[in-house]
Image (cartoon, rainbow, N blue to C red):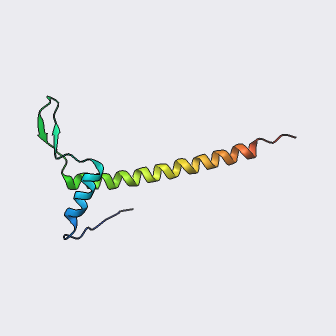
Amino acid sequence: MRLTINVPDNIDQRVIDAFTASFGYQAEITDERGNAAPNPQSSAQFVKAQVAQFIRTTVHNHEEREAGRAARARARDEVVIT
């Protein structure tokens, strides 16, 4: 499956601002020597990564819940005492 999200030009900066503020993007980071450096990941790349992470997390959470339900059902069905 290919997923494409088109954000209209007139609101793209609002979307970037909302995601970078909500998820902690930093335009400047500290390099390995402790010096301030520009973040190699652009704010737009950060937004795309956050959307992808949301999808991954949602799928994993769903699959874990379903696996737990299935395991509980098996445990109930397998414990038969006569």
**Residue 7: x percent and y percent?**
25, 67
Residue ranking furthest to the top = 33
Q: Quarter of the image for the C terminus: give it.
A: top right
Instruction: Determine the residue positioned at 35% across, 63% down.
Output: 3
Instruction: Determine the residue positioned at 29% across, 52% down.
Output: 22
**Residue 43: x percent and y percent?**
20, 53
Instruction: Determine the residue positioned at 21% across, 56% down.
Output: 44
**Residue 2: x percent and y percent?**
35, 62
Specify whether 50 is left or right of 56: left
Q: Quarter of the image for the N terminus: give it.
A: bottom left
Question: Is 12 above or below relative to 61?
Answer: below
Number of numbered discs: 0
Instruction: Determine the residue positioned at 16% across, 47% down.
Output: 27
Question: Is 54 above or below relative to 39?
Answer: below
Specify whether 67 is left or right of 17: right
Specify whether 48 is left or right of 78: left
**Residue 15: x percent and y percent?**
25, 62
Question: Is 9 above or below relative to 54?
Answer: below
